[in-house]
DNA sequence: TATGAATGAGCCTTCATTCAT
DNA sequence: AATGAATGAAGGCTCATTCAT
């Protein structure tokens, strides 16, 4: 979190940073992949952003594709680890859990620089099946597990109606991912400032109303 | 389509089919763009798929980008026209309207070859702002207009509760677009056959429950 | 002289001129070769200027090079024929002859559209040896013959001093050719309007003073 | 030239000579441009002649046109610098100055490989206005300045008659440039060996006779 | 005779990758 | 470990030439 900027050229003029470890390179790569897409990003740019020479990239990565793999892995896994860790501290109330999951996704990913990753992965999934599989298993599936816990708990408690759990899980993140992706694609087409938080708030309202059990006195 | 070629005599060597019109080229291009992405698609491939030589593409399009523009335009606009035409014949009942809109989207786009367009556009929107703007205005915005009508009508009739119309409209297609995009990205990561129709059915159920007005006797 | 413009599209709309003879094609080609150079001129342009289709060019010429050959031949030979014809009517006085030769060159070639031919030929001579040889023999050499006659006559009469005839002949046209070439090359670099006639007047003055016999009473 | 390469060990495979500097590439380019013209010269050929790969050209030049600009600039400017430096050491006698100017031009440019530059520039001036302007200002204009000094000095001293200075200056180099250009264009059309030095000697004789003041005792 | 759609070889340019230092 | 000059394969685009009509 603290070392996400390029090497701050001003600090060490003329001296390449000794500690230019792979993770820094992958970080620079990720930023550019998100910004411009995989193909449109040149290794020159990545090297420049990382403050190293182009050849140095090949000391740590076999190819541009390997760099892509590492960039995704390093960029997203810490976020997932953290999210899962938060699960333990999550509220017992299923609705509150879902709310927290969505909020966490949005504040830690969607609203940040990382919000471009879902778009990037969707765009490149077919071209890099291995990365896609890794992403699916380590990001999507793990993220969905959190939701499943909440939904199952809510159904068990009677708070939620009997649900098609699998599809309801699949559905849960979709609008949030969409909101993140939108900012990296069509957002510029709309003149007025969009309000993704309000969009998600509205979505969550609909989603929760849609899955709640119907009780006579349900005040909603 | 049927009345144009001279004697319809299959394919002759040396005689280029007169019907090798721009639309055929754009069609071939679209198929490949969807399959492999814009950059990864070579003009050679497009030409080969269309059964013409590379140079022929330039008789009809100024550049690869122009071909992209035309491919999107020709590929998606007829679909939108048709969808709007159907609106007139739509049920009066707002819920039924929404159901028909979703079904139409899925059967005419999501489940077809065109289902790759949303992913393609999302991936390339930043690289081709003009195409993105065209797509937003002529596809997204027009598609959303249909939903707005339904929502407003439902709210007016008291069938739907008072809604944040704009955000609810924005939300409506998202899961369907996601389902279409998924087939062109991560679908292969999941071994079991997915069931997008069931996914959308479940989604619509949640969405409608989420927007309905609450009446004591609402049987839902 | 009268048919040097393109076919005046307005006159026969929709009807290709039946009399689109090779010479018209060569004429259009020459105009464009002069304007843009051989390589930079596309056959499309020539065809368009001649008011025919591209394929028609190949009915009359085997290749672009053949068209070049014909363009030069047709463009310049009539001019030479005419100049030689004038020789018969030329003044007996050698100085007057030279003056007339220079004037004829300038008014019939240098100052006209044809003034670009020397530059064109010079630029392409090495690439098209056959055309160059034709041009040398039928234009340069014939043009020089006129000068040689004048010089020899002047020396014989004692009006000119004994001269290195060959080199003095070679020299004669050079400044006029240069003035013509200049208009098609560097002229745009000089802001002020140039005055080629004055330049040539001054040149001829120097040339004649330079070759005159020195007599005490030479009135000059 | 001599002090730069590490151990001057001829050529090693895989080890690109460090001295493959831009100037060498521009030099190779110039030679080929002179030989075949700008368009007809392929980058492959330039690279091959310089002993590098095609991609290497783009390490030093943005485009073929940039290479052209540099080739002209590097090829001709040193020559002009040198010529101007010689001016200081020039004879006081105006006739002698003109003789030296012409001799310098011929021995340093006309008779050398650089003699093709005037032809090249004339041929391409309209296609590359920037280069043309550079050439006009840095070569032609500077070269003419030397002549103007000599002519003005001669007129002032009474050695030359009152002259149309501007046009006489414009005229001065023309035959020399022509002689240089000729060798790169029509020379091959003439069987007998030409003698440009004699041509220029004869020209200078005429030019000087043409501008001298007439004095009774002028022995000429 | 005339057309113009179609061809395909060729060229400039880019960029991931290599390698001598 | 790090450099960055050099490579060369590949792709977009042009245009002289061909050919079925």
Image: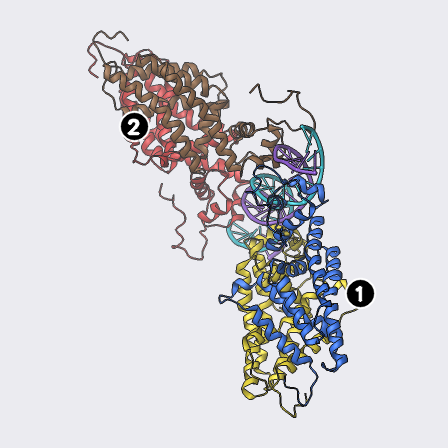
Chain colours: A blue, B yellow, C red, D brown, E cyan, F purple
One can see residue B111 in this view: yes
Q: Is residue C168 above or below residue A214?
A: above
Judging from the image, mark 1 belongs to the subunit labelled B
Bin the neighbour count of mark 1 within 10 Å (Cα to Cα): few under 14, some 14-19, many 20 and up. Answer: few
Q: Nearer the viewer, residue A172 or A155?
A: A155
Residue at 50% in and 47% down: C44
Position of residue A43 in the picture relative to residue C100 (left or right): right
- Residue B191: which numbered mark, if any? 1
Looking at the rendered image, the quarter that the C terminus of chain A falls into is bottom right
C-alpha gap between disc 1 and disc 2: 88 Å
Q: Nearer the viewer, residue D68 or C173?
A: D68
Looking at the rendered image, the quarter that the N terminus of chain A falls into is bottom right
Q: Is residue C193 above or below residue B50?
A: above
Kindly identify which residue carries mark 2: C199
**Residue A109, position as x, y percentages in the image:** 64, 62
Q: Nearer the viewer, residue D19 or B79?
A: D19
């Amino acid at each position: 979190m603290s070392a996400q900027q390029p090497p701050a050229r001003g600090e060490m003029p003329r001296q390449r940073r000794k500690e230019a470890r792979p993770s820094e390179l992958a970080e620079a790569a990720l930023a550019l992949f998100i910004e411009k897409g995989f193909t449109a990003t040149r290794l020159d740019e990545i090297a420049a952003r990382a403050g190293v020479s182009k050849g140095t990239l090949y000391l740590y990565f076999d190819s541009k594709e390997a760099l892509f793999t590492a960039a995704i892995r390093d960029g997203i896994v810490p976020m997932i680890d953290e999210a899962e860790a938060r699960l333990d501290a999550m509220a017992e109330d299923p609705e509150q859990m879902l709310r927290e999951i969505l909020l966490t996704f949005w504040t830690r990913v969607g609203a940040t620089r990382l919000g471009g990753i879902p778009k990037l992965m969707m765009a490149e999934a077919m071209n890099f099946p291995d990365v896609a599989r890794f992403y699916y298993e380590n990001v999507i599936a793990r993220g969905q597990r959190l939701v499943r816990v909440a939904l199952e708990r809510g159904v068990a408690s009677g708070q939620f109606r009997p649900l098609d759990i699998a599809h309801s899980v699949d559905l849960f993140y979709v609008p949030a991912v969409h909101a993140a992706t939108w900012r990296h694609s069509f957002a510029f087409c709309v003149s007025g400032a969009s309000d993704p938080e309000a969009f998600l708030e509205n979505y969550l309202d609909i989603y929760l109303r849609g899955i709640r059990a119907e009780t006579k006195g349900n005040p909603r």
